[in-house]
Image (tube, rainbow, N blue to C red):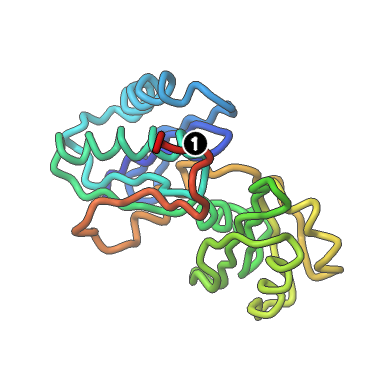
Amino acid sequence: MNILAVDTALGACSVAVLSGDRILAHRFELMDRGHAERLAPMVEEAMGEAGLSFSALERLAVTTGPGTFTGQRVGLAFMRGLRVALKKPLVGITTLEAMCAAAMAQAQTQSAAALHDAKRGEVYFALVDSGNVVIEPSIALLDDAVAAIKARCPQALLALCDTAAQAAAPRFGGDAKMTAIRFPDALWVARLAQSRPAPQDVPKPLYLRAPDAKLPA
């Protein structure tokens, strides 16, 4: 299956083109802003490197969140447009699940927890074990998130990833293994999306907190 995946939801912009297990092209750039300007050129570069026409794609994938309000919408809007133009299924993958998959591969564990600094003393968090999402993306205070993960984690060794992992690690004692994964990567978005059933609906952004900006009353 030929698949194009993108991520713009957090502090990076990435694109991956896969054909089955083969990585045809992969781009990953750290950036706090500028996703909207960089995404289309990155996709063009990746498709050129892959040697595929857009019509040869069989599936599309994108991160749905949690993430920044603007970042989430950049990737989703771009891939929704491609979905309409190409008439191909678009799979949504959460940012935290993509990072957990990368962390498990890096740490060689069966389980991983992603904890992302959501500011205000809170974290976005999720737990994956043996390919199953045990705790869906949620938001809580750091100590409450760690307690929830401990209560649901069946594995002795847990891989930790994301921007709040360093702060969380001491709370897990010796049962946690730090990884270098801090942001989602479209490569893992593509790998996860390949095994999902083709969705009938369009992926929607996953917001765990209301945006700070308010419309005038």
Is 182 left or right of 170, judged from the image as shown? left
Q: Secondary structure at mark 1?
A: loop
Q: Is residue 149 above or below residue 74?
A: below
Q: Is residue 155 left or right of residue 213?
A: right
Residue 135, relative to residue 183: is it above or below?
A: below
Residue 128 visible in image:
yes
Q: Is residue 36 left or right of residue 109?
A: left
Taking the spot 46% from the left edge, 54% from the top edge, the residue there is 94
Residue 201 at x, y = what percent?
21, 56
Q: Position of residue 108 (x, y in %)?
A: 66, 62
Instruction: Look at mark 1 in the image and give the residue it sits on.
Output: 213
Q: Nearer the viewer, residue 153 or 168?
A: 168
- Image coords of residue 107 (percent x, y): 69, 58
The answer to whether residue 30 is left or right of residue 5 is right
The residue under the point 46% across, 38% down is 214
Q: Nearer the viewer, residue 71 or 2?
A: 71
* Disc 1 crowd, CA 10 A, few/some/many (<14, 14-19, 20+): few
Residue 83 sits in quarter: top left
Residue 171 image offset from top left, x and y in percent: 83, 65
Q: Quadrant of the C terminus?
A: top left
Residue 112 against residue 1 in the figure, above or below: below
Instruction: Identify residue type, mark 1.
Output: Ala
